[in-house]
Image (cartoon, helix red, strand yellow):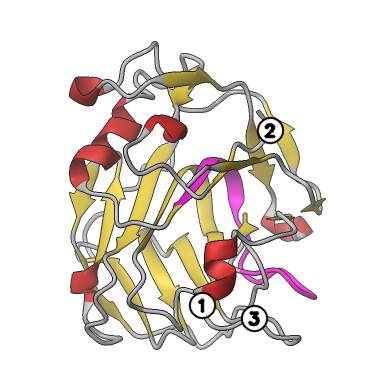
Amino acid sequence: MATITFTPSMLYGAGTRGVPLIPKSGGGGGDTGLATVSNAFSMTFISADNTVMDVGELPPYFKVNPIGTAKDNPWSVSLWVSGSGGSFFGLPYAALSSTLARSFGFNYSSGYLSFGGKFAGARFRETSYATSTAYDESIFNHIVVTYDGNDLGATDPSSYKLYVNGSDVPVSYQAPNPNDFRTEGIAIGASGTGTSVVVGWDGQVDEVGIFTASLDAPIVESIYSASLPLGSGVTGDLTKLSTPPIAWYRMGD
């Protein structure tokens, strides 16, 4: 299946196309040797100004198979994030409707990473949340969340994996946030879109890839390693992966 490459189509609020404080590689690729492409921009989001990127459409796979109503369908999300806190991404969880689908949000707040939502019945967060986090506020972090297509129940995290900077980070069940975030399409820089942005992001987001497969650890590591050392102007070419993304939001490039 061909990858659709998008550039930002709708950016609300005071967000900007940023200069490269982004994780890029000098042509690395680690042991897996993923090919690289140039990357000069990321996208800056400001939660106080309700900045959110609404791409204006949803990949066809997720129109037919929203991630909550078709739980036998695997998926993964890969993106680079830098910032101090809030919600940096949202996917529709249930079937689309005129009242907007409920959002499955991705967050870094209260000093730990988490993902999920009210309508999903659960969130999952870093197991070590009380003592430490894998997220580093001082740099760009490569974050990947995967779901393997095995619905083991709302409180069982076994079907999900969280990777931060190439490493598998254990996650545990967390009671869902009472806020009912909603989004019709892909929300970047916040948990949802619609009439207002709820829990937006303060910082930058780059190279958002959405996959219809559960990426394994070697593939995740190859994406991360292709961008080392940080700041050298290239990133992994996701179209060259053995399981390329269904959509790739380059955030300004």
Q: What percent of the width, then of the height, locates residue 182?
A: 63, 78
Between 113 and 206, the residue placed more toward the observer is 206
Assign a secondary structure to mark 2. loop
Q: Which residue is pictured at 65% across the width and 71% down the height?
A: 198
Give x and y (percent) for residue 188: 61, 55
Residue denoted by label 3: 96
Q: Is residue 24 visible?
A: no
Residue position for label 1: 93
Q: Residue at x 24, y 55 (%)?
A: 132
- Which range is magenta? 192-210
What residue is disc 2 on?
A: 252
Q: Is residue 52 left or right of residue 110?
A: right
Position of 228 with respect to 171 (left or right) is: right
Question: Residue flagged by tag 3: what amino acid is it?
Answer: Leu
Does 221 appear in magenta? no
Identify the amino acid type marked 1: Tyr
